[in-house]
Image (spheres, grey):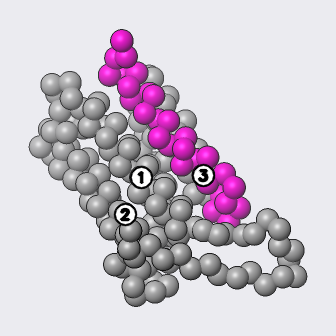
């Protein structure tokens, strides 16, 4: 049987999928390193929850991921006014607001991820899944394509516009 502590350790795999997708984005190395650090620190923090240093490193890594994800999403929103109404924006706003609600409100109300009855770990896994979905939406739309591996430095880079306005 998988205990709740192990459930949090295994749920760090959500971050591995995002790290893998960022690995081949040479213009977004800091985003990649932030997710790599978050994956490692989150796994170690949940494996050894009594070490406060790991808790602080995990929080710094989480804030770095938020910042590195916000930058390309903000550029995506500013590039075209219609992007505010895209499916990607709906996914990002919904996942972001839900994660903030679960974490911030849950902290002050001792609910969700801070529940004392044992369901906190389940909500924590849900927060990780939601944040991973949001970051995959950013990577899939806002960072694509960063560079064409077949192009040479003398060739012009063309901008590919992906439209996700409708399903």
Q: Which mark is drawn over residue 141? A: none
Q: Is residue 159 left or right of residue 151?
A: left
Residue 56 in the image: above or below residue 30: above
Q: Is residue 163 left or right of residue 28?
A: left
- The residue beneath circle 2 is 92
Pointer 1: residues within 10 angstroms few (<14), some, or many (20+)?
some
Task: Give the image quarter of residue 81.
Answer: bottom left
Q: Residue furthest bottom?
A: 81
Q: Secondary structure at mark 2?
A: helix
Question: Residue drawn at (25%, 54%), measured in percent from left and top?
Answer: 98
Tell me how many marks there are: 3
Q: Are marks 2 and 3 in contact (CB under 8 Å)?
A: no
- The residue beneath circle 3 is 21
Q: Residue furthest top?
A: 1
Q: Residue furthest left?
A: 109
- The residue beneath circle 1 is 133
**Distance Cα–Cα, label 2 vs label 1:** 8 Å
| Magenta residues (range) | 1-29
Counting from the top left corner in percent of width and height, residue 9 is at 44, 27
**Distance Cα–Cα, label 2 vs label 3:** 17 Å
**Distance Cα–Cα, label 3 vs label 1:** 12 Å
Counting from the top left corner in percent of width and height, residue 116 is at 16, 27
Residue 49 in the image: above or below residue 137: above
User: Of the residues under marks 3 and 1, which one precedes in the sequence?
Assistant: 3
Q: Is residue 2 magenta?
A: yes
Task: Give the image quarter of residue 27.
Answer: bottom right
Q: Quadrant of the C terminus?
A: bottom left
User: Of the residues under marks 2 and 3, which one precedes in the sequence?
Assistant: 3
Counting from the top left corner in percent of width and height, residue 26 is at 71, 61
Counting from the top left corner in percent of width and height, residue 115 is at 17, 33
Residue 81 in the image: above or below residue 12: below
């Amino acid at each position: 049987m998988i205990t709740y502590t192990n459930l949090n350790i295994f749920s760090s795999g959500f971050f591995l999928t995002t790290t893998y997708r960022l690995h081949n984005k040479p213009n977004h190395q800091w985003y990649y390193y932030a997710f790599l650090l978050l994956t490692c620190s989150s796994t170690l923090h949940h494996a050894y929850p009594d070490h406060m240093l790991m808790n602080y490193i995990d929080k710094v890594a989480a804030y770095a991921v938020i910042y590195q994800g916000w930058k390309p999403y903000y550029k995506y929103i500013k590039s075209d006014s219609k992007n505010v109404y895209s499916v990607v924006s709906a996914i990002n706003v919904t996942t972001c607001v839900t994660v903030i609600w679960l974490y911030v409100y849950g902290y002050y109300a001792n609910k969700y991820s801070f529940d004392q009855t044992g369901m906190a770990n389940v909500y924590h896994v849900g927060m990780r899944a939601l944040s991973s979905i949001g970051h995959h939406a950013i990577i899939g739309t806002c960072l694509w394509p960063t560079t064409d591996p077949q192009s040479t430095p003398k060739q012009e880079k063309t901008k590919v516009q992906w439209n996700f306005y409708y399903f």
